[in-house]
Image (spheres, helix red, strand yellow):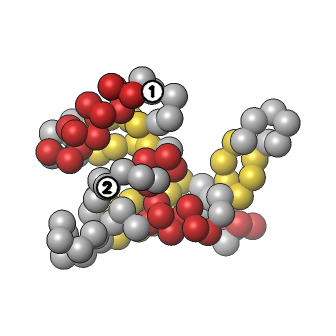
Protein backbone atom coordinates (compact mmCIF):
# COMPACT_ATOMS: atom_id res chain seq x y z
CA UNK A 1 0.00 0.00 0.00
CA UNK A 2 0.88 3.64 0.17
CA UNK A 3 0.43 6.38 2.75
CA UNK A 4 1.46 9.90 3.73
CA UNK A 5 3.37 11.22 6.76
CA UNK A 6 3.61 14.80 8.05
CA UNK A 7 4.02 16.74 11.29
CA UNK A 8 0.34 17.72 11.36
CA UNK A 9 -0.78 14.12 11.87
CA UNK A 10 -1.80 12.80 15.25
CA UNK A 11 1.19 11.13 16.95
CA UNK A 12 -0.55 7.73 17.06
CA UNK A 13 -1.32 7.93 13.34
CA UNK A 14 2.31 8.83 12.56
CA UNK A 15 3.52 5.83 14.60
CA UNK A 16 1.07 3.55 12.80
CA UNK A 17 2.32 4.72 9.39
CA UNK A 18 5.97 4.41 10.49
CA UNK A 19 5.42 0.86 11.76
CA UNK A 20 3.56 -0.17 8.60
CA UNK A 21 6.34 1.26 6.39
CA UNK A 22 9.07 -0.42 8.46
CA UNK A 23 7.28 -3.78 8.22
CA UNK A 24 6.80 -3.50 4.45
CA UNK A 25 3.02 -3.23 4.55
CA UNK A 26 3.36 0.27 3.07
CA UNK A 27 5.67 0.28 0.04
CA UNK A 28 5.34 3.95 -1.00
CA UNK A 29 5.31 6.82 1.48
CA UNK A 30 4.75 10.50 0.64
CA UNK A 31 6.29 12.57 3.41
CA UNK A 32 7.48 16.00 4.40
CA UNK A 33 11.06 16.61 5.51
CA UNK A 34 10.01 15.91 9.11
CA UNK A 35 10.23 12.18 8.37
CA UNK A 36 13.99 12.47 7.85
CA UNK A 37 14.56 13.94 11.29
CA UNK A 38 14.70 11.57 14.23
CA UNK A 39 13.00 8.60 12.60
CA UNK A 40 15.04 5.59 11.47
CA UNK A 41 13.03 4.55 8.42
CA UNK A 42 15.36 3.47 5.62
CA UNK A 43 14.10 3.37 2.04
CA UNK A 44 15.55 2.13 -1.23
CA UNK A 45 14.41 5.16 -3.25
CA UNK A 46 13.98 8.74 -2.03
CA UNK A 47 12.45 11.33 -4.38
CA UNK A 48 12.64 14.96 -3.31
CA UNK A 49 10.09 17.03 -5.19
CA UNK A 50 11.44 20.55 -5.05
CA UNK A 51 14.17 22.21 -3.03
CA UNK A 52 12.04 24.92 -1.44
CA UNK A 53 9.29 24.70 1.15
CA UNK A 54 6.43 26.95 2.22
CA UNK A 55 7.28 28.50 5.59
CA UNK A 56 4.11 30.48 6.17
CA UNK A 57 2.52 33.70 4.97
CA UNK A 58 5.09 35.91 6.70
CA UNK A 59 8.04 34.10 5.12
CA UNK A 60 6.78 32.44 1.94
CA UNK A 61 8.90 29.86 0.13
CA UNK A 62 12.43 29.27 1.38
CA UNK A 63 15.14 27.00 0.07
CA UNK A 64 15.54 23.79 2.06
CA UNK A 65 18.96 23.91 3.71
CA UNK A 66 21.60 21.45 2.43
CA UNK A 67 21.76 19.61 5.77
CA UNK A 68 18.05 18.82 5.63
CA UNK A 69 18.36 17.68 2.01
CA UNK A 70 21.22 15.37 3.03
CA UNK A 71 19.13 13.96 5.90
CA UNK A 72 16.27 13.30 3.47
CA UNK A 73 18.56 11.65 0.91
CA UNK A 74 20.21 9.66 3.69
CA UNK A 75 17.09 7.50 4.02
CA UNK A 76 18.07 5.77 0.76
CA UNK A 77 20.20 2.63 0.89
CA UNK A 78 20.96 2.55 4.59
CA UNK A 79 23.77 0.12 5.54
CA UNK A 80 22.38 -2.96 7.23
CA UNK A 81 19.01 -2.53 5.51
CA UNK A 82 19.88 -2.36 1.80
CA UNK A 83 22.86 -2.95 -0.47
CA UNK A 84 22.20 0.18 -2.54
CA UNK A 85 19.93 3.19 -2.64
CA UNK A 86 18.90 5.98 -4.96
CA UNK A 87 18.06 9.61 -4.22
CA UNK A 88 16.46 11.80 -6.88
CA UNK A 89 16.04 15.56 -6.57
CA UNK A 90 13.47 17.20 -8.84
CA UNK A 91 13.80 20.98 -8.89
CA UNK A 92 13.47 23.91 -11.27
CA UNK A 93 16.44 25.02 -13.35
CA UNK A 94 17.12 28.18 -11.32
CA UNK A 95 17.52 26.09 -8.12
CA UNK A 96 20.07 23.64 -9.55
Q: Is residue 48 above or below residue 4?
A: below
Considering the image in quadrants, where does the C terminus appear?
A: bottom right
Tag 1, which secondary structure? loop
Disc number for residue 63: none
In percent of width and height, residue 23 lies at 14, 45
Label 1, label 2: how far apart the Cα atoms are: 18 Å
Instruction: Look at 72% across and 42% down and name the residue there.
Output: 55
Q: Mark 1 or mark 2: which comes first in sequence?
A: 1
Q: Is residue 63 above or below residue 11?
A: below
In percent of width and height, residue 49 lies at 53, 53
Which residue position holds label 2?
Answer: 40
- Dot 2 crowding, Cα within 10 Å, few <14, some 14–19, many 20+: few
Instruction: Look at 85% across and 36% down and name the residue there.
Output: 58
Q: Is residue 82 above or below residue 18?
A: below
Q: Disc 1, disc 2: CB below 8 Å? A: no
In percent of width and height, residue 38 lies at 42, 52
Q: Is residue 41 left or right of residue 90?
A: left
* Towards the viewer: 88 or 42: 42
Instruction: Look at 50% across and 69% down and name the residue there.
Output: 70
- Dot 1 crowding, Cα within 10 Å, few <14, some 14–19, many 20+: few
In percent of width and height, residue 73 lies at 44, 66
Say which quarter of the image contains residue 31. top left
Instruction: Look at 27% across and 69% down and name the residue there.
Output: 78
Say which quarter of the image contains residue 11. top left
From this viewpoint, which residue is outermost toward the right? Answer: 58
Say which quarter of the image contains residue 91. bottom right
Which residue position holds label 1?
Answer: 9
* Number of marks drawn: 2
Amino acid sequence: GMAYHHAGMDASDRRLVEQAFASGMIRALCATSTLAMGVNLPAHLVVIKGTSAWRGAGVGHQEIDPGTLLQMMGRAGRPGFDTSGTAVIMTDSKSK
